């Protein structure tokens, strides 16, 4: 097993992006009514994190077939440390209320792409 700091240094040394983000996998922990009751506050909190630059991506996930929602969610935070990301996840009304629980891991982004198209005359932006 390689220490995280050593792996990050090695990845940067070979030219990888080595962008560190934090991934919370959120799972139902209470009754469906508990999740529904916390949903409005959860979405407001997510919007607040997005506006502050602490939320990279978030949304629900399907089951393994891809055909049904299973209640799982994925939240990707931008934070200065694992501890700071944990504080963001713990403050989420879904987790704070006990409606959902989460596991948190560091995630190093090394490769990939994001396509962004800005329509200047139409004042539109498309992300693919």
Image (spheres, helix red, strand yellow):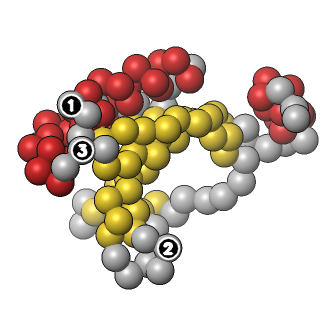
Query: Which label lies toward us, 3 or 2?
Result: 3
**SS for callout 1:** loop
Front-most of 58 and 18?
Answer: 58
Residue receiving disc 1: 97
Image quarter hosting the N terminus: top right
Give residue 91's position: percent from left, percent from top: 30, 24
**SS for callout 2:** loop
Label 3: few (<14), some (14–19) or many (≥20) C-alpha neighbours in 10 Å: some
Specify which label sits upstream in the sequence, 3 or 2: 3
- Circles 3 and 1, Cβ within 8 Å, touching? The answer is yes
Residue receiving disc 3: 30
Specify which label sits upstream in the sequence, 2 or 1: 2
Quadrant for residue 98, please give it.
top left
Q: Give the side of residue 32 with respect to residue 102, left or right.
A: left
Quadrant for residue 43, please give it.
top left
**SS for callout 3:** loop
| Disc marking residue 64 | 2
Give the Cα distance between marks 3 and 2.
Answer: 22 Å
Query: Which label lies toward us, 3 or 1?
Result: 3
Q: Compared with residue 29, is residue 119 higher up or lower down, i.e. above or below?
A: below
| Disc marking residue 83 | none
Residue at image point 72% right, 38% down: 18
Query: Is residue 98 in view from this perspective?
Result: yes
Residue at image point 46% right, 60% down: 116
Label 2: few (<14), some (14–19) or many (≥20) C-alpha neighbours in 10 Å: few
């Amino acid at each position: 097993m390689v220490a995280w700091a050593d792996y990050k240094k090695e990845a940067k040394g070979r030219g990888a992006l080595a962008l560190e983000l934090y991934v919370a996998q959120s799972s139902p922990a209470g009754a469906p009514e508990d999740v529904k009751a916390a949903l409005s506050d959860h979405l407001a909190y997510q919007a607040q994190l997005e506006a502050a630059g602490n939320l990279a991506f978030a949304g629900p996930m399907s089951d393994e077939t891809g055909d049904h929602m299973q209640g799982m969610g994925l939240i990707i935070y931008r934070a200065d440390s694992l501890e700071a990301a944990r504080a963001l996840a713990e403050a989420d009304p879904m987790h704070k209320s006990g409606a959902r629980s989460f596991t948190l891991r560091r995630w190093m982004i090394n490769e990939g792409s994001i396509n962004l198209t800005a329509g200047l005359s139409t004042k539109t932006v498309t992300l693919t």
